[in-house]
Image: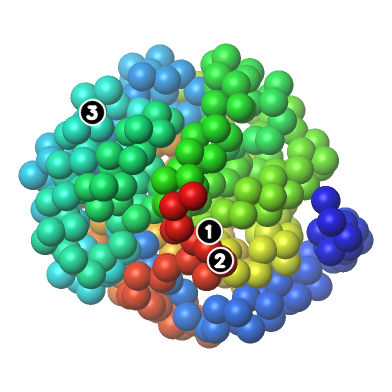
Amino acid sequence: MNDAMRDTVVYYLTAGTLELADRARALCEEVHGKTVLLRALIEFSNTCALNCHYCGIRAGNHAFERYRLEPTELLAAALGAYAAGLRSFVLQSAEDPWYTTARLAAVVASIKSSCPEAALTLSCGVKTRAEYRELKAAGADRYLLRFETSDPELHRRLRDGIGLGTRLKALEDLKAEGYQVGSGFMVGLPGETEKTGIDNALLCAELGLDMVGIGPFIPHPATPLAGSPQVGLEKTLRMTSLLRLLMPKVHLPATTAAGSLDPQGREKMILAGANVLMPNMTPVPARKNYLLYPGKICLDEAGEKCLGCLRIRMLGVGRELSYARGDSLMEGAGNVA
């Protein structure tokens, strides 16, 4: 940790929440202006081979309906987002073995061919470097892979024995293959300490990420963490501000989980230093079954209605929506090592 990072952490530990947010918001406006970038989120499969203890769509949960969009349905969802003017898509799924790298690469190629101006982010879990290379060659621009916690023991326990090193190696491979890379963590996981949260933020800075996605941990009743205490949103807001102060150029979403925990959660994250929103463009019938946590918002709104709602919400906090690609501002982003 360098001196600037150390000073920022000291400030984080001593400043009040509103003071911290004011400073982070001013820095965000200085670097990113008053526009909020949009990323169209398409959740294309909730079929998962893993059993992470915090996740509502874990393989061991049999109390909901599994779904998987066919490649043609996934393309149609992307075309709908493109027609609505969006130029940045996030294709997110559970770790679904049916969607092999070859199948996913074919979908990526078809979307890029049909939506040539769009930036395409994948969020489909850990793969080999060769697989990341294949997906990049097909047209993927970015990859999102959250590490969830920087505490190795907590990571192993909550991810059903999977080590943190596996995740970090994947992030290293993604950067080496020339992706713009996103990662992040949950705030308020059972067993974490204040030091864990700070270490999470410092790891994001040390990784040189292009995007950082965080959100509050919300206990799901069909997981081993059911009944865990719910931490209030303030901790997520403070962590949002810390990340902005540590990483002025990073793209930082105001996440749906914050809006699910607090009706004004996304607005509060924007005012604490976030600069991205991810409207859900998944076909409405499938959305209700991509429940990583209970109480998820925006499950029955068509895409255009969601965009209209976000526009009004952002105007209320002095922001305008941007439909641009919103590429990384980080030096050297997307360069193959």
Residue displayed at 82% across by 41% down: 195
**Left or right: residue 286 compared with residue 276:** left
**Left or right: residue 276 compared with residue 286:** right
Q: Which residue is mark 2?
A: 330
Residue displayed at 36% across by 62% down: 39
**Left or right: residue 321 compared with residue 106:** right
SS assignment at label 3 = loop
Residue 43 x, y percent position in the rendering: 30, 44
What's the mark number on residue 100?
A: 3
Q: Label 1 is placed on what type of residue? A: Asp
What's the mark number on residue 210?
A: 1
Q: Real-space Cα distance between discs 2 and 1?
A: 6 Å
Instruction: Choose between 294 and 332: the one closer to the eye.
Output: 332
Residue 145 x, y percent position in the rendering: 48, 41
Residue 14 x, y percent position in the rendering: 91, 61
Q: Earlier in the sequence, mark 2 or mark 3?
A: 3
SS assignment at label 2 = loop
Instruction: State if disc 1 and disc 2 touch (CB < 8 Å).
Output: yes
Residue displayed at 56% across by 67% down: 331
| Residue count near mark 3 (Cα–Cα under 10 Å), binned few <14, some 14–19, many ≥20 | few
Q: Earlier in the sequence, mark 2 or mark 1?
A: 1
Residue 125, quarter of picture: top left
Residue 261 appearing in the image: no
Total label count? Answer: 3
